[in-house]
Image (cartoon, helix red, strand yellow):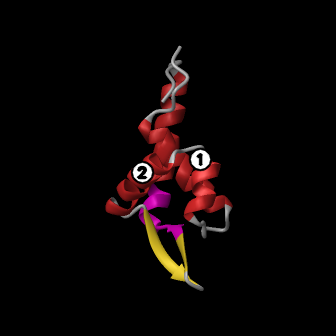
Amino acid sequence: MNARRSKISILVDILRLILRKNNKAKPTHILYGANLSHLRLKKYLGLLLENQFIEEFAESEHKFYRVTTKGLEFMQEFRKVQQFSEAFGISV
């Protein structure tokens, strides 16, 4: 069995992590919380920003990320897919 996380599970992990931080997370917190290298973090944040699942904002000269409404909808739909796949014994 492959222990590596899928691309979609990494995206959802990042979104969940941001939400756990009261929907305001610094890149460093995401880096460590999602267990990603700096290069992979940039790749996934770029993908999330491009798809408008998160937005970047500055506060007190620090960069933060928050989950958008579209990101919340993505997470809800992912939960449905996850429950469906688990019903058939397939992990996502």
Q: Nearer the viewer, residue 5 or 35?
A: 35
Horizontal placement of 47 versus 30: left or right?
left
Q: Quadrant of residue 52?
A: bottom left
Q: Nearer the viewer, residue 75 or 52?
A: 52
Q: Label for residue 44?
A: 2
Q: Label for residue 34?
A: 1
Residue at (60, 66) in percent of width and height:
25
Going by the numbered disc 2, the residue's amino acid type is Tyr
Q: Pointer 1 and pointer 2: residues touching (CB < 8 Å)?
A: yes
User: Where residue 49 sits: x, y (%)?
Assistant: 38, 63
The span shown in magenta is 65-73
Residue lying at the far bottom of the rendered structure: 60
Horizontal placement of 52 versus 57: left or right?
left
**In the rendered structure, which disc, 1 or 2, sits on the residue that comes first in sequence?**
1
User: Where residue 34 sits: x, y (%)?
Assistant: 59, 47
Q: Nearer the viewer, residue 69 or 41?
A: 41
Q: Secondary structure at mark 2?
A: helix
